[in-house]
Image (cartoon, rainbow, N blue to C red):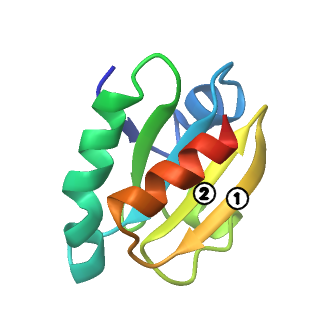
């Protein structure tokens, strides 16, 4: 499974109604730290295919979802399980730290 492109339209179906845990990266094209962790997020999407869904929400293109979750700083990573937020990270993390957080969310 590849990285999901999440939008205001598909967020409910892909994240809140998912049977798998979901990691959502709220980002924007102009955000330096967002661009820094983007390759890590893409690698993790491949590594955890079938175990965890990983997707990205562009906050400029999808303000409704970003506002709904109170996203004030980016990157913000939200971990969902059974439609509920189980963890939240604001700022860039290393791949090792992100993997640890993903493992805890399983």
Residue 2 vs 9, above or below: the answer is: above
Residue 16 visible = yes
Q: Is residue 35 left or right of residue 93?
A: left
Mark closer to the chain start, 2 or 1: 2
Residue 90 vs 98, above or below: the answer is: below
Q: CA distance from mark 2 to mark 1?
A: 6 Å
Secondary structure at badge 1 equals strand
User: Do callouts 2 and 1 mark residues in contact (Cβ within 8 Å)?
Assistant: yes
Locate residue 63, reporting x and y percent: 50, 65
Which residue is depicted at the point 70% across and 58% down? Answer: 87
Q: Which residue is tagged 2?
A: 78
Q: Is residue 106 left or right of residue 57?
A: right
Which residue is depicted at the point 20% across and 69% down? Answer: 35
Secondary structure at badge 2 equals strand
Q: Nearer the viewer, residue 88 or 4?
A: 88
Residue 47 vs 72, above or below: the answer is: above
Q: Which residue is tagged 1?
A: 87
Residue 100 vs 43, above or below: the answer is: below
Q: Quadrant of the N terminus?
A: top left
């Amino acid at each position: 499974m590849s990285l999901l492109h999440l939008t205001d339209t598909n967020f409910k179906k892909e994240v809140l109604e998912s049977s798998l845990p979901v990691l959502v990266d709220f980002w924007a094209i102009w955000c330096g730290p967002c661009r820094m962790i983007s390759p890590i997020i893409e690698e993790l999407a491949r590594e955890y295919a079938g175990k965890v869904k990983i997707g990205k929400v562009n906050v400029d293109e999808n303000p409704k979802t970003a506002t709904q979750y109170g996203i004030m700083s980016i990157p913000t990573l939200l971990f969902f399980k059974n439609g509920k937020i189980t963890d939240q990270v604001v700022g860039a993390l290393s791949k090792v730290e992100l993997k640890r957080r993903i493992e805890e969310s399983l």
